[in-house]
Structure formats: structure tokens, C-alpha cells
């Protein structure tokens, strides 16, 4: 009985997570393999997630009413739900999730797919802190560090910065590990390193700077 309950709960959790996975991982896949404009990568992920959500909704409607609903209307609703979910995360970062106000302003300079990846995990980890996002070469000098020509914090050929730094100090190693695993599962690159302070560096591949970090 307990095993069946755990299996059912696991299945429901998987079905709940899958649309978010398709949304973000699908966008990353399109970006990495086809190098479309940022908006096209994101739209592709939205369409993939909406297709899955459409099947969920069609299944539930069939079970509840015994008949299939209007396909166009159901898919339109699924697409709208995914789009409404994305919009706040693309343009807003809570002050509680940013080290400084300047970091909040830098947030919209990140690649939209990376923004969506960060905003999604903030729903699960309210204590997540973005310590750095977009940078200029002179910013490294201000921090007492040598400038890095290969940094993905700089504006890339996509028009956006492709890297973000997250606080790891006093966050707990288990929590830091889980955050890193989340970003890797979503297709991002992660690197734990020390610059001005210990942090988790998360990046999205740049086609204009393939070896960048």
C-alpha cells in the first residue's frame, strides 16, 4: 500500500515537473543546436511545454466530461498559461533574490532563457541570491581581478550576457549541490569557483564565444 502511494506521488510529481523541464531544457536545446535569436529559442520552449500541457488538459477534460474539447481552444489556453508563467520571470527579479539593486537592473541584460532558469528556481528556493549578472571589462578591475576576455558575463553575439553568479556562502552544501544539479539538468553549465567570494557560476553556451565561461 505504501509503495503504491509513493509510486503515485512520484508519478504526479514527475508529471508536474515535466512541463517546466520542457520549457527550459527545450529552449536551451534549441539555442545550443540551432543558434536562433533568443526570442525564438524561448518561443520554442513555450510551444513544447504548451503541447504537453494541452495533452494534460485534453486528458482531464475527457475523463471529466467523457468527450474531447475544442482542440484549438484547449491549445490556446495551454499556450496562454505557459506564456503567463514566463512573463514575470523574464522581467522581474525580487529584491530578496538580488545582492544589490544594481544586480536587479542587470537581470534583464541576461539571455532570456537564463533568466527563466533563474526565476523558476526562485519559486523553490526563496533564499537564492544573485550576486552578479552582466559585467563590463572594467568591472573586474573594480573587484581587484584581472579582466577576462572570455567571460560570458559580457554581452555576447546574442545581444545578452550569458552568465550569472549565485551566492553559496552560508547556504548549506546540500542546498548548493541541489541548485547546481537543477541547472545542469536544465542544460546550463555550472562552475563552483572563487573570485571575490565563493559562488556558483551558471552559464549558457555562447555561439560567438564557444570557449567562454
Image (tube, rainbow, N blue to C red):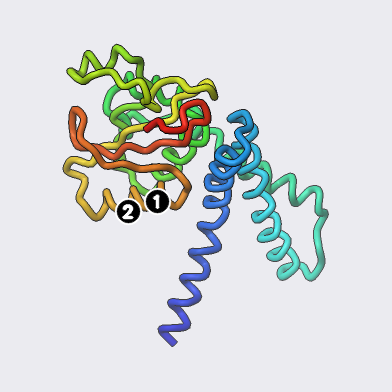
- Give the vertical position of 15 relative to 29 (above or below): below
User: Image point 49% across, 38% down: which residue?
Assistant: 116
> Residue at 62% of width from left, 49% of height from top?
49
Nearer to us in this view, 176 or 1? 176
Q: Between 168 and 138, which is closer to the camera in this rendering? A: 138
Horizontal and vertical percent for residue 47? 67, 44
> Do labels 1 and 2 touch, CB within 8 Å?
yes
Q: Label 2: few (<14), some or many (≥20) within 10 Å?
A: few
Q: CA distance from mark 1 to mark 2?
A: 6 Å
Q: Residue at x 18, y 32 (%)?
A: 197
Mark 1 crowdedness (10 Å alpha carbons): few <14, some 14-19, many ≥20? some
Residue 10 visible in this rendered orientation of the protein? yes
In which quadrant of the rendered image does the N terminus lie?
Answer: bottom left
Q: Is 78 placed left or right of 159 in the picture?
A: right
Residue matched to label 2: 178
Figure check: 93 above or below 105: below
Task: Please say if 8 is above or below 58.
Answer: below
Badge number at residue 20: none
Q: Which residue is mark 1?
A: 182
Secondary element under disc 2, as helix, strand or loop, is: helix
With 48 as the anchor, is 191 left or right in this view? left
Question: Residue 119, position in %: x, y?
Answer: 44, 38
Q: Quadrant of residue 136?
A: top left
**x and y, in percent, of residue 156 in the image:** 48, 23
Quadrant of the frame with the C terminus: top left
- Residue 51: x and y, percent? 69, 52
Circle 1: element type: helix
Residue plotted at (27% across, 28% down): 99
Amino acid at each position: 500500500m505504501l509503495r503504491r502511494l509513493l509510486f503515485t506521488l512520484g508519478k504526479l510529481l514527475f508529471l508536474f515537473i515535466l512541463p517546466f523541464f520542457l520549457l527550459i531544457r527545450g529552449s536551451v536545446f534549441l539555442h545550443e543546436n540551432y543558434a536562433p535569436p533568443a526570442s525564438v529559442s524561448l518561443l520554442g520552449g513555450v510551444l513544447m511545454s504548451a503541447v504537453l500541457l494541452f495533452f494534460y488538459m485534453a486528458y482531464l477534460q475527457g475523463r471529466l466530461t467523457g468527450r474531447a474539447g475544442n482542440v484549438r481552444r484547449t491549445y490556446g489556453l495551454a499556450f496562454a498559461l505557459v506564456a503567463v508563467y514566463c512573463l514575470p520571470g523574464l522581467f522581474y527579479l525580487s529584491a530578496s533574490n538580488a545582492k544589490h539593486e544594481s544586480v536587479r537592473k542587470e537581470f534583464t541584460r541576461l539571455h532570456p532563457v537564463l533568466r527563466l532558469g533563474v526565476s523558476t528556481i526562485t519559486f523553490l528556493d526563496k533564499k537564492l541570491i544573485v550576486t552578479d549578472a552582466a559585467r563590463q571589462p572594467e568591472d573586474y578591475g573594480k573587484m581587484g581581478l584581472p579582466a577576462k576576455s572570455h567571460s560570458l558575463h559580457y554581452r555576447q553575439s546574442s545581444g545578452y550576457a550569458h552568465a550569472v553568479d549565485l551566492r553559496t556562502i552560508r547556504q548549506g552544501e546540500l542546498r548548493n549541490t541541489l541548485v547546481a544539479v537543477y541547472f545542469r539538468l536544465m542544460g546550463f553549465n555550472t562552475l563552483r569557483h572563487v573570485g571575490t567570494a565563493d559562488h556558483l557560476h551558471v552559464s549558457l553556451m555562447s555561439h560567438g564565444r564557444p570557449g567562454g565561461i
